[in-house]
Amino acid sequence: MTNYEQLTPNPSTTVIDNASDPETQALATMIAQAADDRKADNIVLLKVGNVSYLADYFVIITGFSSTQVKAIAEAIEHQVAQTYNRLPLRTEGKREGNWVLQDFGEVIVHIFLPEEREFYNLEAFWGHAERLEFSSEEVTRL
């Protein structure tokens, strides 16, 4: 098991428009799979690199309790640490568990309770981004 204290965020990571980079999509897909393993619902990947400088992908996830939201965040952090030997650059909202944001540089993860996801409606706000639906078998373009 990885000792998280030994891993540090990489402050030299810069976000550039490489949304077509297969490694970046693989990271986003792996994050979605880690969430799916914790029974997350309505997992959506938005390819925002062509419409925003913030990241290449947003992964938007629903959990049904603050405990599940936190567990999904932990599972994602663990999987990224195991596979890429890195931690999020920033994490917000983990203590409250209503909306956890994890910033991995090229991929930003939003884990919501259903009410918060409906209220903020990031899919509509970023409606001009390419939307990829996640299924545990594959990611498909819409």
Image (cartoon, grey):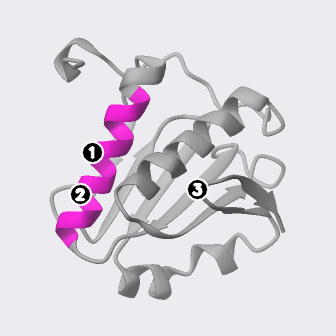
The residue beneath circle 1 is: 74
Q: Which mark is residue 136?
A: 3
Say which residue appears at 30% left-offset and 77% top-offset: 64
- Is the residue 114 above or below the residue 14 in the image? below
Calculate the distance from the C-alpha at mark 3 to the C-alpha at mark 1: 19 Å
Is residue 118 shown left or right of residue 53? left
- At label 1, the amino acid type is Glu
The amino acid on which the numbered mark 3 sits, given as a three-letter code, is: Ser
Three-letter amino acid code at the position of disc 2: Lys
Q: Are marks 3 and 1 in contact (CB under 8 Å)?
A: no
Can residue 95 be seen here? yes
Q: Earlier in the sequence, mark 3 or mark 1?
A: 1
Which secondary structure, mark 1? Answer: helix
Whether residue 55 is in magenta: the answer is no
Q: Is residue 3 left or right of residue 140?
A: left
Start-end of magenta stretch: 66-80
**Label 3 element class:** loop
Asked which quadrant contains residue 45, the reply is bottom right
Magenta-colored segment: predominant secondary structure: helix
Residue 54 vs residue 82, the one in the foreground: 82
Quarter of the picture containing the N terminus is top left
Q: Residue at x 53, y 51 (%)?
A: 32
| Residue 88 visible within the image | no
The residue carrying mark 2 is 70
Is residue 66 placed above or below 114 in the rendered structure? above
Mark 2 and mark 1 in contact (Cβ < 8 Å)?
A: yes
Q: Residue at x 47, y 65 (%)?
A: 61
Q: x%, y% of residue 56?
A: 70, 43
Q: CA distance from mark 3 to mark 2?
A: 20 Å
Does the magenta-highlighted stretch encompass residue 71? Answer: yes
Q: Quadrant of the C terminus?
A: bottom right
- Label 2 environment density (alpha carbons within 10 Å; few <14, some 14–19, many ≥20): many
